[in-house]
Image (spheres, grey):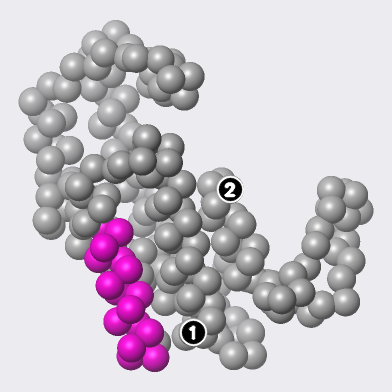
Amino acid sequence: MITNPVAINAINKITSGNENNPVKTTASDLNQNTLKSDTPIDTIELGKGTENFGTYKVDREKLNAMKLDFQKNTDSFKQMIKEMLEKQGLKYEQVMKAFDKGEDVVVKVDEETRAKAAEAVSANGYWGVEKTSARILDYAKTLSGGDASKLEQLKNAFQAGFDKAKEAFGGKLPDISQQTYDKVMAGFDTLFDKGE
């Protein structure tokens, strides 16, 4: 499930049928389980199979597989952090709430966790620049279904999300994040050059 408001807005924009006349939905519309618009819309429902939306096709099975892989690796990383915190008598949920409130939390990283994290963000690691940028671009290609206008919207959504993340972290992100951003943007340019 996507819970990031930037991602949700991007998905909503991507699925609108006419960018110049987007579908407007009010809370009362949602409560009545109806959408009122004269504008035809495309929708993406993740499940099985491939959907043809006229000018582009979305491979839902591939999207689901990508989502499951990401969730598995995210859960594994969270578990590693939880175990490290519990060794120090801390609770994951309490630490996350403190971070959300802007409170300082002292956490000591043991060597085993440091080594696992270093491997995860290494050149060949799941969270490293190469694999992360490849996943982002593969997701964009799959979700756009070959429609260049949808791919452009996804590129813009990625850029907006990166800008929001920078803002949230005081205007600067770690080098690995900037390198990933550069690799993804170059990848989008390559996709546009190839006409994918």
Asked whether 125 falls inside the magenta stretch, the response is: no
Predominant SS along the magenta part: helix
Is residue 61 visible in the rendered image? The answer is no
Figure quadrant of the C terminus:
bottom left
**Looking at the image, is mark 2 or mark 1 earlier in the sequence?**
2
Q: Nearer the viewer, residue 42 or 88?
A: 42
Going by the numbered disc 2, the residue's amino acid type is Pro
Q: Residues within 10 Å of mark 2 (few under 14, many from 20)?
A: few
Residue highlighted by disc 2: 5
Q: Residue furthest top?
A: 89
Q: Quick check: 16 left or right of 52?
A: right
Residue highlighted by disc 1: 148
Q: For residue 185, which quarter of the picture?
A: bottom left
Element type where label 2 sits in the image:
helix
In this rendering, the answer to whether 107 lies above or below 25 is: above
Asked whether 191 falls inside the magenta stretch, the response is: yes
Q: Quick check: 168 left or right of 189?
A: right
In this rendering, the answer to whether 80 lies above or below 143 is: above
Going by the numbered disc 1, the residue's amino acid type is Ala
Residue sitting at 26 percent across and 13 percent down? Answer: 106
In this rendering, the answer to whether 34 lies above or below 114 is: below
Element type where label 1 sits in the image:
helix
Residue sitting at 53 percent across and 47 percent down? Answer: 4
Q: Residue 162, which numbered label?
A: none
Residue sitting at 36 percent across and 48 percent down? Answer: 72
Q: Which residues are magenta?
A: 180-195
Q: For residue 55, which quarter of the picture?
A: bottom right
